[in-house]
Amino acid sequence: MIIQQAGMAGTLESSDITISIEPNGTKGIEIELKSTVENQFGNQIRKVILETLQGMGIEHAYVRANDKGALDCAIKARVMTAVSRVVEGDCRPWEAE
């Protein structure tokens, strides 16, 4: 899938994360992370974002994440929602066929 435009998902509430995603040409996946728990969990947050994008077939994207202590499942859900808002076509791998 190719990111066609900028999009966002999430809130700035405690235990949530905002994910903004936009096209990144052919530069791969770049992640800019701001987190209240970055020292403890920054690498894990980046890993969840990267693995979720790769699992959805995204090869190039610029991602800004503003984390307020979200769990991995919330991070994954926000990434999937942001991607579904910026790609063309059906992008719902989590739905049963």
Image: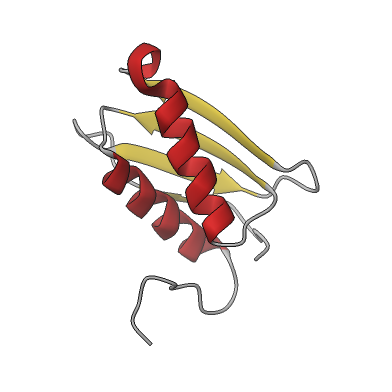
Name the residue located 55 percent from the left edge and 28 percent from the top edge.
32
Rendering quarter of residue 68: top left
Nearest the viewer among 44 and 75 is 44
Rendering quarter of residue 11: top left
**97 lies above or below 42:** below
Nearest the viewer among 42 and 23 is 42
Whole-percent x, y for residue 63 in the image:
56, 39
Horizontal relation, residue 27 to residue 29: left or right: right
Residue lying farthest left? 14
Name the residue located 37 percent from the left edge and 70 percent from the top edge.
94
Name the residue located 48 percent from the left edge and 63 percent from the top edge.
85
**24 lies above or below 33:** below
Name the residue located 47 percent from the left edge and 42 percent from the top edge.
49
Report the quarter where the C terminus lies. bottom left
Total of numbered circles in the picture? 0
Rendered image coloring scheme: secondary structure
Report the quarter where the N terminus lies. bottom right
Residue lying farthest top? 39
Horizontal relation, residue 16 to residue 82: left or right: left
Nearest the viewer among 97 and 69 is 97
